[in-house]
Image (tube, grey):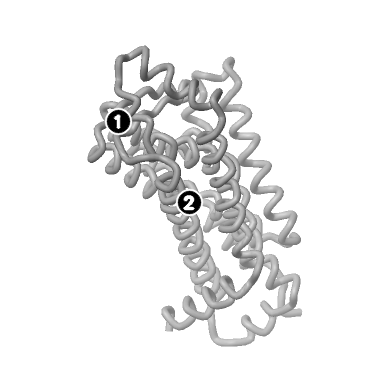
Amino acid sequence: MFYHQLRNELWKLFAKKRTYIGFGMFLVAQLLIILLFRYNSGARAMITRPLLQMNYSLEQFYSSLTIAVPVLINIAYLLLPLYVALVGGDLVAKEAEDGTLRMILSRPISRFRLLLVKWVAGAIFSVILALVLGVSGILFCSLFFHSGGLFVAMPWEHVFSVFESTEGWERYIEANLFLTVKAISIMGLAFMFSCFNMKPAAATIVALSVFLISKILQDIPYFADLQPWFLTYHLNVWVDLFRQPIPWFQIGESMSLLFGFNVTFFIIGWLAFQVRDIKS
């Protein structure tokens, strides 16, 4: 029965046109960024200068993988939270707004089970969106750049790494897989607010506001010693996959905290939804 309910929920989710806004905007943004890297001499110089200073071969490391990483990072930092929050904020609030929740709750199904099905559907969407971001990015980069090793430079994250082709692919795939956790967590935050008595747009905006406030506080230099207390600090744990060596203990710590955040978001949303008068 859970499978059939989840299938129907996914059918409803992917039948909505706005569900595909994120996919379309990702493709447009990726193409624009990649074309600028391909034809803008300033962008090329900023990437190649550190390689030349370190005596690395441009033929080997100015590659599709090297370009795919900044494409992935910039979109994952800015656009990914927007579109997973948009879907998470719609999952419950939109049906409450349309009045379809009254019909659903007239059937013999608990509110907990209803929310669980919707949350799983949102999580599946978030995973697909994050994976499409990674796969489409490397495919587009392969059209304009040759294959080779991976060079990663993220000064704001204190990351500067060089990998041979095989290890570079491994790091890219692992980072993309861990990125799905960020997508699920932001979706879960928006889902929590969607369970409250508010409009879908309001749930999305409030979730994004919480995310951005956490990001602002994290980036203020005076609060550097408090960074591990902010949600966004742990959401970006996927970037650690590009470090040498990989800090697995720190990654495990952040993953366990994100698991706790997601459980907390769901429980708060469930409690708020449990006391709502929807059927009257």
At mark 2, the secondary structure is helix
Q: Residues within 10 Å of mark 2 (few under 14, many from 20)?
A: many
Q: Nearer the viewer, residue 206 or 41?
A: 41
Residue at the spot x=51%, y=23% of the render?
226
Measured as percent of width and height from the top left, residue 107 is found at 59, 87
Identify which amino acid the numbered label 2 is placed on. Leu
Above or below residue 101? Residue 170 is above
Q: What is the residue that sits farthest to the top in this orientation?
A: 53
- Which mark is first along the chain, 1 or 2? 1
Q: Position of residue 78 (x, y in %)?
A: 59, 41
Instruction: State the image coordinates of residue 97 (x, y, percent, origin top left).
Output: 75, 70
User: Which image quadrant for residue 248?
Assistant: top left
Q: Provide the residue designation for mark 1.
A: 60
Disc 1: CA contacts within 10 A as few (<14), some (14-19) or many (>=20): some
- Of residues 21 and 195, the one nearer the viewer is 21
Asked if residue 190 shows in the view, the reply is: no
Q: Residue at x 44, y 36 (%)?
A: 67
Q: Is residue 273 left or right of residue 231?
A: right
On screen, residue 38 above or below 260: above
**Number of marks in picture:** 2
Quadrant in the picture for residue 255 = top left
Closest to the observer: 177 or 272? 177
Say whether residue 108 is visible: yes
> Circle 2 is placed at which residue position?
133
Query: Farthest residue toward the bottom?
Result: 107
- Residue drawn where x is 59% and y is 15% of the image: 222
Residue at 30% x, 15% y is 55
Where does the C terminus fall, quadrant-wise? bottom right
How far across and how far down the image is residue 69, in percent? 43, 37
Q: Amino acid at mark 1?
A: Gln
Question: Taking 117 as reference, is 74 above or below it?
Answer: above
Q: Quadrant of the N terminus?
A: bottom left
